[in-house]
Image (tube, rainbow, N blue to C red):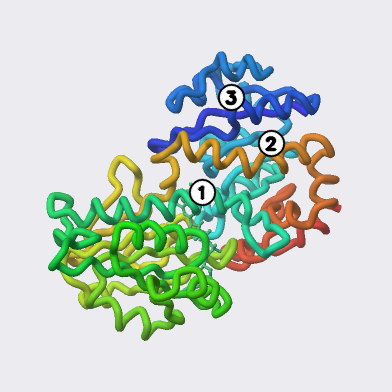
Amino acid sequence: MLIGVPKEIKNHEYRIGLTPAGARELARNGHKVMVQRDGGKAIGLTNEMYEKAGAEIVDTAEEIFRRAEMIIKVKEPQPVEYAMLREGQLLYTYLHLAPDPDQTAGLVKSGCTAIAYETVTDRKGGLPLLAPMSEVAGRMSIQAGAHALEKAQGGSGVLLGGVPGVKPAEVLVIGGGVVGINAARMAMGMNAHVTILDRSLDRLKYLDELYGHQLTTIYSTHDAIEERLPETDLVIGAVLIPGAAAPKLVSRDQLKLMRPGSVLVDVAIDQGGCFETSKATTHQNPTYEVDGIIHYCVANMPGGVARTSTFALTNATLPFAVQLANKGPKKAMLDDEHLLNGLNVHAGKITYKAVADDLGYEYVPAAQALG
Ligand SMILES: NC(=O)C1=CN([C@@H]2O[C@H](COP(=O)(O)OP(=O)(O)OC[C@H]3O[C@@H](n4cnc5c(N)ncnc54)[C@H](O)[C@@H]3O)[C@@H](O)[C@H]2O)C=CC1
Ligand SMILES: CC(=O)C(=O)O
Ligand SMILES: [Mg+2]
């Protein structure tokens, strides 16, 4: 199969869809890999490294999209990118379609086959291609939040860990999945006092067994969140209902319960955000203020630590990329229900139920759409 890896074009996005080691694995499986010139340069992955791995360096994204049978990317395609996709072409990347009607319409119109990393599943009920970036974003959310709490950034001037004689900050993590546990770990490591909320009692039990008295676990309700807002310095939004738009868990009205300069970090922003006042921001301008509360809502947080993230992402995506290339997309997906769960769009049809429901499309089950 001819595989193309374009340079990412989202604001301050320096990740690339495949490492040189990944390109070499695909080449060893008999496939041809094209990488856009300087696609990994910003994170020290040079054209020479890709050439040594057997890849062809191609000058433009246009040429990659024109020639490739499979496109491997990181972020959802931008308008100039989805305009270049065509019927029969496979797109393998993050999509986050539910909160993005324009991209969804673009993919439907293109006729391409689009697999979303974030809805591929595993045997344990996890999301193995979302998990590595959730680990990164969860860990980063605390450093981003700690920075935003600084006075010069508009924050309340609270140090997460406090000091002897002064109490630490209160951190509230809403959603105890991969982002949530990584955020909690970092915040506890910085000596903050951490409370984590989830709707899954099994997950709360697991967190309790793991961290004991160090971590307060609470069942997530509207009341539980509202009660804690007045004393919370930093809230991390880390909920997910796979494929669907995020539920809104803190309203604009409730911001006035918080101390001015307190911080909301909405990691769930890529699914539309879990605070009413969230709107996506970029690494260039990551924060804004609403009613005295600082919001950090960067939709591609792992792009900020693009080198670590690129290796972590390829580690997870490569085995499926090899399956897709070796067997062809249809057979690879029909052979593996977990990969099939990743199919969101095929030949003009929406094949993921939560996306179809949220955006008002007819839902066609993935296996049926593939025929
Ligand atoms: N902004 C960014 O750059 C990034 C964003 N993300 C996003 O972060 C979000 C979380 O991802 P993961 O942790 O991997 O998901 P996950 O599936 O591991 O965890 C989500 C948790 O939320 C819980 N949950 C659902 N509804 C809830 C509610 N009402 N209250 C409390 N908990 C609730 C679930 O029970 C689950 O434990 C996703 O939207 C993901 O796309 C992930 C990586 C990077
Ligand atoms: C998961 C995601 O949206 C990201 O890594 O940017
Ligand atoms: Mg994102």
Residue 68 in picture, x, y percent from top left: 70, 28
Residue 86's mark? 2
Which residue is the site of mark 3? 62
Estimate the spatial distance between the alpha carbons at disc 1 and disc 2, rounded to whole Å: 28 Å
Badge 1, how many Cα within 10 Å: few under 14, some, many 20+?
many
Check disc 3 and report its element: helix, strand or loop.
Answer: helix
Cβ of disc 1 within 8 Å of ligand 2?
A: yes
Position of residue 218 relative to residue 232, above or below, is below
Check disc 1 and report its element: helix, strand or loop.
Answer: helix
Position of residue 162 relative to residue 15, above or below, is below
Which is nearer the N-term, disc 1 or disc 2?
2
Residue in the image at 21% along x and 73% along y: 258
Residue 103 in picture, x, y percent from top left: 54, 48
Q: Nearer the viewer, mark 1 or mark 2?
A: 1
Residue 19's mark? none
Residue 262 in picture, x, y percent from top left: 22, 65
Q: Quadrant of residue 98?
A: bottom right
Query: Amino acid under label 2?
Result: Arg
Check disc 2 and report its element: helix, strand or loop.
Answer: loop
Extreme residue in the bottom direction = 223
Estimate the spatial distance between the alpha carbons at disc 3 and disc 2, rounded to whole Å: 12 Å
Query: Amino acid under label 3?
Result: Glu
Position of residue 94 relative to residue 229, above or below, is above
Which residue is the site of mark 1? 133
Query: Amino acid under label 1?
Result: Met
